[in-house]
Image: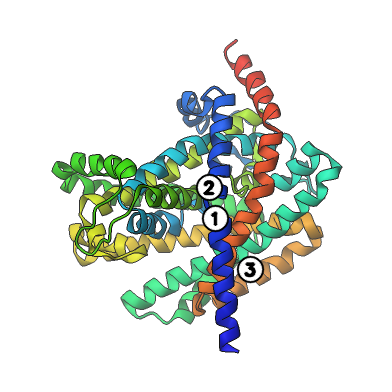
Amino acid sequence: MADNAESFAAMVAAVSDIVWGPWMLGLIGATGIILTLMLGFLPLRKLGFGFRQLLHRKQGEGTIAGYAALATSLAATIGTGNIAGVATAIHLGGPGALVWMWLIALVGMATKYGEAVLAVHYREKDHSGQYVGGPMYYIRNGLGPRFAWLAGLFALFGMFAGFGIGNMVQAHSVADGLHDLFDVPKIVTGVVAAVLVGMVILGGIKRIAATATALVPAMALAYLLCGIVLLAMHAGDLPAAVARCFHDAFNGSAAAGGFTGAVVAEAIRFGIARGIFSNEAGLGSAPIAHASASTEHPAQQGSIAMLGTFLDTIIVCSITGLAIVVTGAYETGETGTTLSATAFSRAFGDTGEIMVLAGLTVFAFTTLLGWSLYSERCAQYLFGEKIVLPFRAVWVILIMVGATSSLTLVWSIADVLNALMAVPNLVALLALSPVIVKLSKEYFNRETQ
């Protein structure tokens, strides 16, 4: 039996390596580049406009405010990937991986923009009067009934992927950290997390959005302030650290200390892969939240949505990555959360580990909330509104399971499902790109008049 389980785990891991190979990373990157060019670099040109829309109080139809939709999507994206994912990318791909994370984020802004534009344009109202949308709706309503099967596949993959990467993996990361640092029993972490998440998600999208709006800015600012203080303490070494990142991005990394070195191909692969896992541009998850936004026009919400990729990767991931490089922590050979904790502990002592764990705990909690909405919407699309309450109950129970289980297999399965849900979404983005461009011109031409 044990041999069969190990064989199955090895098979899933092998499939994960294949589906997240060069072809998938290339497809996501190419989609971002194509949309960036078709839009005339609009996400970069309109970055300031997007930030101004966060203060825009004139709203159109929708269920939650536009900025609340951004907070909800950031709740899901700013998670363990910003701490453990960045560290893993640098461990495997060297400091140069950070540059490739930045590059994929810059084109990923166009992808996230396009996702939100389509999500709002093709959204629907459910029986309770709430707006619902996302890739499954813009595939079916945009590409037509012939592609309803593709929409169903996205929803199926999205529903199950959420149970892994958005639920059990997050709970496991927090339980592991608290157990290792403070000897907190994993079941205790699981029960507390399940109760807190349950109290929020039972209130539906409005309570999730309200919680995210309160927590996300506070948690991000606290983490950023700690990181900025660390970088200020190493200000003299920062220019050399940034130069090292750019050099290694195109020349590879030499072995140093416990770090084994990396070639350019590894910097590209792990930088792009972990960047995508962190900001989720192209996976099709974030537009599920943005579809509920109160907005005057799809392009207006798109300009808010693209900020998610910028804030997640260009800002938050950069703090983690630069902290690891500037302190030389990557040379220890550590990886994941331990590597990030090592970087912060070099600046703040034992308090640094607590800072990282606190950030990880809050990030994971909000990810549990954000992904509960994504998976629930996918389940609702497949089975109707009657599935909502049973789904929420299962979601809460699996938090306790994840906190107390070994999740190597679950992580690999979630990786595969993430890739599978990305494919229908990317097909729809490319096929409906003329719609994205048309709506963008319609809105921004009106804005300049």
For marks 3 and 1, give the CA distance.
Answer: 26 Å
Identify the amino acid type marked 1: Trp
Within-10-Å neighbours for mark 2: few <14, some 14–19, many 20+: many
Q: In this rendering, is residue 220 above or below 392?
A: above
Identity of the residue drawn at 38% across and 78% down: 179
Question: Label 1: few (<14), some or many (≥20) within 10 Å?
Answer: some
Q: Position of residue 293 (x, y in %)?
A: 64, 39
Horizontally, residue 169 falls left or right of residue 162, namely left
Report which residue position mark 1 lands on.
20
Mark 3 residue type: Trp
- Residue annotated with mark 2: 25
What's the CA distance linking mark 2 and mark 3?
A: 30 Å
- Is 32 left or right of 159, judged from the image as shown? left
Q: Which of marks 2 and 3 is in front?
A: 2
Q: Where is residue 70 in the image (x, y as percent from the top left)?
A: 54, 42
Question: Which of 105/252 is in front?
Answer: 252
Q: Which of marks 3 and 1 is in front?
A: 1
Q: Which of marks 2 and 3 is nearer the N terminus?
A: 2
Q: Determine contact: label 2, label 3, CB under 8 Å.
A: no
- Looking at the image, can residue 119 be seen? no
Q: Residues within 10 Å of mark 3 (few under 14, many from 20)?
A: many
| In the depicted structure, whether residue 101 falls above or below residue 45 | below
Which residue, as the protein is rendered here, is positioned at the far bottom? 1
Looking at marks 3 and 1 on the same chain, the residue that comes earlier in the sequence is marked by: 1
Residue at the disc numbered 3: 395
Residue at x-position 30% and y-position 43% = 251
Residue that protrudes farthest toward the left in the picture = 236
Which image quarter is the N terminus in?
Answer: bottom right
Circle 2 SS class = helix
Would you identify the image quadrant in which residue 440 lies? top right
Amino acid type of the residue that numbered disc 2 sits on in the rendered structure: Leu
